[in-house]
Image: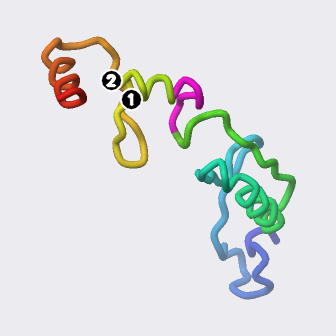
């Protein structure tokens, strides 16, 4: 039955074997971040990985910058205007709101 999860008759009598994930339609299975120069290589590797999963998968190239929530053109503009500050693999969003001393400290750190 369905409790064996493709392990043959090992551990029969209704004991589940193995590990599965419940994935909804349209839910991302994996995400890859890379440089634009490696885009063709990344797409080819994901195309080969599709065969390891049951069902139909789509490869989607995002318009966002990395794993952030900003589009590429908006990201570069916000980075140039110091609204986004690098923080490891992500960025911190620092709008022109909040205490004046925090803005002053940030501008002192940027412009010296």
Which residue position holds label 2? 94
Q: Nearer the viewer, residue 108 or 56?
A: 108
Q: Splitting the image into 4 quarters, where does residue 17 fall?
A: bottom right
Q: Splitting the image into 4 quarters, where does residue 18 fall?
A: bottom right
Residue 6 spot, x, y in % from top left: 79, 77
Residue 28 spot, x, y in % from top left: 68, 47
Q: Residue at horizontal 66%, vertical 58%?
A: 21
Q: Is residue 67 visible?
A: yes
* Other residues around mark 1 within 10 Å, as few (<14) / some (14–19) / many (≥20): some
Using the image, tell me which numbered label, if any, was put on residue 72. none
- Whether residue 65 is situated above or below residue 20 in the rendered picture: above
Q: Nearer the viewer, residue 78 or 44?
A: 78
- Whether residue 86 is situated above or below residue 40 in the rendered picture: above
Q: Nearer the viewer, residue 68 or 72?
A: 72
- Whether residue 95 is situated above or below residue 76 in the rendered picture: above
Q: Secondary structure at mark 2?
A: loop
Label whose residue precedes the other's in the sequence (2 or 1): 1
| Magenta range | 68-75
Q: Residue at horizontal 36%, vertical 48%?
A: 88
Q: Nearer the viewer, residue 107 or 29?
A: 107
Q: Which quadrant holds the N terminus? A: bottom right
Outermost residue toward the left in this view: 101
Which residue position holds label 1? 84
* Other residues around mark 2 within 10 Å, as few (<14) / some (14–19) / many (≥20): some
């Amino acid at each position: 039955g369905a409790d064996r999860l493709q392990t043959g008759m090992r551990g029969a009598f209704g004991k589940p074997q193995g590990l599965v994930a419940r994935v909804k339609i349209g839910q991302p299975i994996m995400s890859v971040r890379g440089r634009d120069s490696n885009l063709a290589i990344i797409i080819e590797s994901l195309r080969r990985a599709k065969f390891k999963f049951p069902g139909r998968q789509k490869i989607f190239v995002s318009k966002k910058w990395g794993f952030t929530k900003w589009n590429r053109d908006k990201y570069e503009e916000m980075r140039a205007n110091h609204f986004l500050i690098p923080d490891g693999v992500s960025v911190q969003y620092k709008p022109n709101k909040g205490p004046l001393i925090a803005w002053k400290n940030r501008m002192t750190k940027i412009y010296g």
